[in-house]
Amino acid sequence: MAVVLDARDLNKHFGAITAAMNINAAIEQDSVVGLIGTNGAGKTTFINMITGYIKPDTGSIVYQGRDITALSPREITRAGICRSFQIPQLYSSLSVFEHMMMGLGVVLRNAGLGGYFSRGRPNVPGHDAPAEEVAERILKRFGLSGYRDKNAQVLPGGVRKLLDIALTMVAKPTILLLDEPTSGVSAEEKFGIMDMVMSAVKAEGATVLFVEHDMEVVSRFAQRVIAFYDGRIIADAPPEIALTDPEVKRFVVGGALHRLDEQQAAPHA
Amino acid sequence: MNRDRTLPILGAVMLVVVLAGPLLPQWALFLVTIAIAKGLVALGLMLLLRAGLVSFGQALYYCIGAYTAGSVGRFFNVGDMLVQMIAGAAVAALVAFILGFLLARYRGIFFGLLSLALSMILYGLLVKSEALGSTDGFNVLPSTVLGIRPSEAWVRYVVAAVGCGVALLATALVYRYLRTPLGQLAPAIKDNEIRVEYMGTSVRNAIHAMYVIAAALSGIGGALAATTVGHIDPDMAYWTTSGEFIFITILAGTGSVVAPFLGAAIFGIIHTVAFDLSPNTWQMSLGTALLLLIVFLPDGLWSLFTRRKAA
Amino acid sequence: MDQIPAVIVDGIFYAAWLFVAAVGMTLIYGVMKIVNLTHGSFYALGAYAAASLTGAWLAKGYPPMLSYGVLLGSAVLVSVIVAPLIERGILRFMYAKDEVVIMLITYALFLILEDTIKLIWGVDPYFIAEPYGLLGSFDVGDLSYPTYNLILVGIALAAGIGLTLLLRGTRIGKLLLTVIHDPEVSRAMGINVDRFYLVTFTFGSMLAAIGGAFTAPTVSVVPGLGVEIIVLSFAVVVIGGLGSLPGAALGAVIVGLVRSATIHYAPEVELFVIYFVMALVLAFRPRGLFSLAEPRKI
């Protein structure tokens, strides 16, 4: 499969802290990649470098054959790489629907539509429908229609998370980066959220990278796992191989998988 | 979504003013015109306030507008108030466009303080500028419109009527702007800049645009005030003048493009009444009103009209 | 070139005055995160209290040499009465609000205080020139300066050194740093944050009042005295970095020297140059010369 995103030899230091060291990863089109590692291992730094929030000290990021290392977050977003956040980044004074309209407005504007002198309701590029319709459609897909006119401030945690992810879909991303999509979400909700996201992504067709601490989620949804430790990649393989790698077991999943093993070995305990 | 009737209502109110104008006494016409001039400045401040920015130096552009209007007369012998207002808006917008590269990088109190410093720079320059009358300022040429000079009895009325027309036009343009994606971005910028950037648009450019629009509106307001009062001086740039504009904007709230004019009118009435009753305590009334507003009506007077809907 | 000594001496005097007038503003911002526009009101209050009390003192024929104590005493008195009233009565209910909103609230309070001063002291000017001339003068080269100017230099040094020692060397100073760093955590740790705020606000305002009180003998005390001092103080503390004590000192010295140089060489740009320096510093160091970087947000 074609490589859509290629991280080449990324290095990043914050003072004495190594946030990224010799990071190399080629991401294939339409793949679903799980990024795992303990806190501070370099997962979010990796995402922040791809989206331009922080710049690597050395190395480059190539997206669809174009070097995007020096671009700003908004230019990278416009190029088709969209992200969600560990802590949902919402507009506290706006309703769910207004969130979508805000995002779609930007998409229209970036496409040269919806400017000062334009009239009527142009179709949103990529969605082939006017903004209101697209907003309703995306909300429905994420099960958010019932919250349409609720203010973001009063939404429960799982819904905030979904809205944060739904917002990335307005721009029809080629690559979707999800920073801990299930963190802060109850155990019952997390698979529901991931199912919803994955079906939406499949329908729209995008490559997904997601940061995740929950190994059950990783093994169920990821086709490929990249494990970080101390700013380095220590494993890059399909989940069944990566999650059983001794180094990954020791530094990343350790406890979690261990407990799973025990449960399987002694189901009655 | 029910049909928004903001503009027709504002148009109707202005029409009433224009029709009733000949019946109004001179001082009332003066009050109305000054309220429109200050309302224009407050309209600009409102755009910034929607994005969470409070400019403590908007008097800069008010003063630039006024001095541009005055200079057009002083140096080119042009007293046409339309020319004055267009020139005032243009010069203010140009200065704002240049300064905007700097100011759009700032938020919160730093935006406020830097804009304050810039307005005080102008004040400092004008005070020492002999050609512009230093601390005394200078008189503005009597107003003409399209080459016609109204008679002494009608000049106040004509200025008020033309002011109404220009304000209505400017407000309609702002109203339209607020319905574009860029105009609607303001509350999002206030709430969460990071998300705005990650939606794929530039917060800085959006603020820069708002800043220039706000300056142009203030420039028109300054020019209108100059031709109405007939005299300008450096105090128009002093920080207490900016304070007045902030008061009007907070008083009005950000709920509607009409609000700033209402705020300016109420400010004018408070000013006149309180000043007549007791010239030494009118600032106290103003301060008390501001304090009460911030505590009990943080979204301004306009929220009294819209509260029903929000509940 | 022979003007250089005069520029420096004038600059130092001006810087000392600026520092006393402005340091309270940076202190209050540093601890309470309030951009306090009532600062100018306290400056004016100090000047008025000093003018009337010292005037009365001298009119009664009490020893004029003690009038300096009366100047200081009246500044302390007026701020100890008014500052707690404002902090406890109004400001403390506003701490949850946005920085800009609190700034607007202090603007409202400034307007109220302006007229309160007019109500108490009227609108006619007050003069108490006697303390100014009492100490004679001293010479620097061929130039003669009133010895009185040295008092403000002394107060500036005392305030600067005293505050630094207080913050660095004492238990209270360390507790204060904790409060500055995180008021909520400090509260949870059992520190009386409210009292720190009250004391900081009173003390910061007192410094402004002292600045006003010791300026009173050199000017005519008139309404509006505090208006200009607000923006001057802004310039000083913003140049140094809001909330930074050494920053305020540096800001005062920069503004002092720049102003005195322009007065000697280019008097027509005197007012403009101070705000120009402020804008220049903000343009290149948005948070002032002494300031910390902002933390990462995501």
Image: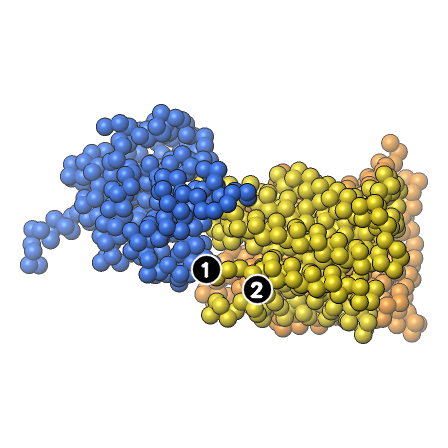
Chain colours: A blue, B yellow, C orange
**Which class describes the residues within 10 Å of circle 1: few (<14), some (14-19), or many (20+)?**
few
- B57 sits to left or right of A226: right
> Which residue is at the front of the view, A160 or C275?
A160
Badge 2 sits on which subunit?
B
- Crowding around mark 2 (Cα neighbors within 10 Å: few <14, some 14 to 19, many 20+) is some
Residue at x 66% of width, y 67% of height = B290
Q: Residue B30: name its quadrant.
A: bottom right
| Quarter location, residue A203 | top left
Q: Secondary structure at mark 2?
A: loop
* Residue toward you, A187 or A114: A114
Q: Is residue C212 visible?
A: no
Q: Position of residue C297 (x, y in %)?
A: 45, 47
What is the secondary structure assignment of the residue under circle 1? loop
Quarter that holds the N terminus of chain C:
top right
In this rendering, the label closer to the viewer, 1 or 2? 1
Q: Position of residue B218 (x, y in %)?
A: 70, 50
The residue sitting at 7% across, 51% down in the picture is A265
Q: Position of residue A153 (x, y in %)?
A: 42, 60
Task: Pick whichever, A219 or B209, lies toward us.
Answer: B209
Write down the residue under mark 1: B1
* Kind of residue sitting beneath label 1: Met
Q: Position of residue A48 (x, y in %)?
A: 39, 39
Query: How far separated are the C-alphas under marks 1 and 2?
Result: 22 Å
Q: Which residue is disc 2 drawn over?
A: B299
